[in-house]
Image: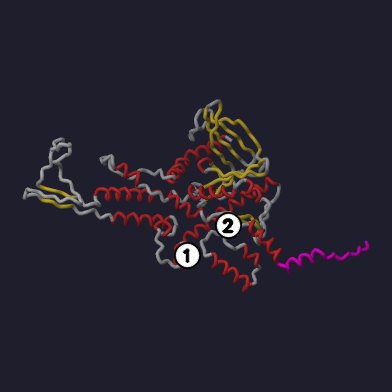
């Protein structure tokens, strides 16, 4: 266990800073936009207000189209019994966190262990899991560690739950603190987890065949572009504040010195520097007095640079430009579908990748339940593609009428259809269809013919 633990801890210390940086950018804690050291202190306010965080949108655009709706046979039908563990563990809501983590960080993890009421399925943060694989694309790791903390005698200690294909080892650091760099641990517990493989299942955003290349998330490649946007936004804010308004000037007038003003009986200042106002007429007795104004700074190049960088970010992130810019003027249905084609392809690719991982989750749960997951079991993804509901129903109706497709097959293709609704529709159809009801009654009333025994 020693070499495996050392390898895992080394990998954890190496990858944790990178994942923590992604987490910070997701929550808007970006590297400060560039400013020279001689800049005025007031520019710090503009720097804080120049952060426009687009990175969560890159994750949300894909994650909002990923929703596991069932585990059924390829030909349809009801969900397999192992689906009960999905509902019991609240995975209907928790699956979103798994998808978002995999998209944002490149990897996400789910732990499946035996519980008092059946398999326990728990999503784990990629910042707290380190997994080792014999080959890059193996379905299960040879060992995986879940990093955490605990308190012993009032002292905070780092913990590692180390899993292999048979046991789980609970290790606690000898020194106080929860530093990821802790390396001196002691085994305090050893338990058999009851599976034939490591119970940690990995979800990958973009897989690679190289053992040295981690799965890349959607956020990390866009961090340099996000930094560039913040720099442009800072320059734009400064230009608007100090140059967008026409600055006026006066020559030939000597303003009064500080703290030297003529005041009236009520203490009001009678003599002061020239103050411009829309409702004031300025008259200068000196014939040599001159007035003028500087041209305003043109902020359009700043805004153009910002918008072009936003479009660049959308292109690298495979997002339709109107998702970020909001430009949807006079777009036909065909043009809108073409603009969203890159996002649709990415969603389909992630459904294939994550679908395989979810199937391994169900295989593990089935093993704990003492059953075998059928070979034709498939992950069913909800159709989240934006379509006109009336147009979809009309197309399904024509498919049933002209192609002879059974109505129940078309029901499964209705947008937003859930297994519970599908089962309810089947019950209602039997109740309102007299022919079906009579056929079922006749089938039940038929007495099977007696079979005469065959002489030996």
Q: Is residue 442 covered in magenta?
A: yes
Q: Is residue 141 visible?
A: no
Residue at screen point 42% across, 66% down: 331
Query: For the view shown, which residue lies furthest in the top direction?
Result: 153
Q: Regarding mark 2 in the picture, which secondary structure is present there?
A: strand
Tell me if residue 284 comes above or below residue 417 in the rendering.
Answer: above
Q: Is residue 252 covered in magenta?
A: no
Residue marked by disc 1 = 337
Query: For the view shown, which residue lies furthest in the bottom direction?
Result: 402
Give the residues drawn in magenta, as a range: 433-456
Q: Is residue 365 visible?
A: yes
Residue at screen point 52% across, 57% down: 349
Residue marked by disc 2 = 381
Q: Is residue 221 toward the left or the right of residue 387 in the image?
A: left
Q: Is residue 84 toward the left or the right of residue 337 in the image?
A: right
The quadrant holding residue 330 is bottom left
- Residue 106: horizontal and vertical position, in percent? 49, 48
CA separation in Å, label 2 and label 1:
20 Å
Q: Regarding mark 1 in the picture, which secondary structure is present there?
A: helix
- Residue 259: horizontal and vertical position, in percent? 15, 35
Query: For the view shown, which residue lies furthest in the right direction?
Result: 455
Query: For the view shown, which residue lies furthest in the left direction?
Result: 287
Q: Is residue 1 toward the left or the right of residue 294 in the image?
A: right
Colour theme? secondary structure
Viewport quadrant of the C terminus: bottom right
So how many labels did they put on this image? 2
Q: Specify few, some or many for label 1: CA neighbours under 10 Å numbering under 14, 14-19, or 20 or more.
A: some
- Residue 227: horizontal and vertical position, in percent? 37, 48
């Amino acid at each position: 266990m020693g070499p495996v633990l050392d390898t895992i801890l080394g990998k954890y210390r190496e990858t944790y800073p990178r994942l923590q940086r992604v987490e910070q950018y997701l929550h808007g804690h970006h590297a400060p936009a560039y400013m020279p050291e001689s800049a005025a202190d007031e520019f710090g306010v503009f720097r804080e207000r120049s952060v426009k965080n687009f990175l969560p949108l890159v994750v949300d655009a894909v994650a909002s189209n990923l929703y596991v709706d069932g585990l059924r046979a390829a030909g349809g039908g009801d969900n397999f019994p192992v689906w009960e563990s999905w509902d019991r563990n609240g995975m209907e809501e928790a699956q979103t966190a798994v998808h978002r983590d995999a998209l944002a960080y490149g990897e996400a993890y789910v732990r499946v262990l035996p519980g008092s009421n059946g398999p326990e399925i728990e999503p784990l943060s990629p910042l707290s899991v380190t997994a080792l694989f014999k080959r890059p694309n193996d379905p299960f790791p040879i060992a995986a560690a879940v990093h955490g903390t605990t308190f012993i005698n009032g002292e905070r200690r780092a913990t590692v739950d180390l899993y292999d294909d048979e046991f789980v080892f609970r290790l606690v650091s000898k020194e106080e603190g929860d530093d990821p760099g802790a390396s001196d641990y002691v085994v305090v517990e050893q338990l058999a987890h009851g599976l034939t493989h490591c119970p940690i299942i990995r979800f990958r955003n973009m897989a690679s065949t190289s053992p040295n290349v981690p799965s890349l998330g959607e956020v990390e490649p866009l961090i340099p572009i996000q930094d560039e946007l913040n720099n442009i936004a800072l320059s734009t804010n400064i230009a608007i504040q100090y140059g967008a308004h026409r600055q006026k000037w006066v020559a030939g007038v000597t303003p009064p010195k500080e703290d030297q003003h003529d005041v009236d009986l009520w203490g009001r200042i009678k003599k002061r520097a020239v103050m411009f106002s829309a409702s004031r007429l300025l008259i200068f007795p000196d014939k040599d007095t001159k007035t003028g104004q500087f041209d305003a700074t043109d902020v359009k190049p700043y805004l153009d640079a910002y918008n072009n960088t936003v479009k660049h970010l959308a292109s690298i992130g495979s997002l339709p430009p109107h998702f970020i810019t909001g430009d949807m003027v006079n777009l036909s249905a065909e043009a809108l579908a073409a603009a969203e084609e890159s996002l649709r392809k990415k969603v389909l690719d992630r459904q294939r990748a994550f679908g395989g991982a979810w199937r391994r989750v169900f295989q593990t749960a089935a093993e704990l339940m003492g059953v075998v997951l059928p070979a034709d079991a498939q992950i069913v993804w909800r159709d989240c593609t934006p379509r006109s509901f009336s147009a979809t129903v009309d197309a399904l109706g024509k498919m049933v009428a002209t192609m002879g497709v059974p109505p129940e097959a078309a029901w499964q293709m209705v947008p937003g259809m859930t297994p519970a609704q599908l089962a309810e529709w089947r019950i209602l159809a039997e109740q309102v269809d007299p022919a079906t009801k009579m056929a079922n009654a006749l089938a039940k009333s038929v007495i099977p013919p007696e079979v005469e025994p065959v002489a030996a």
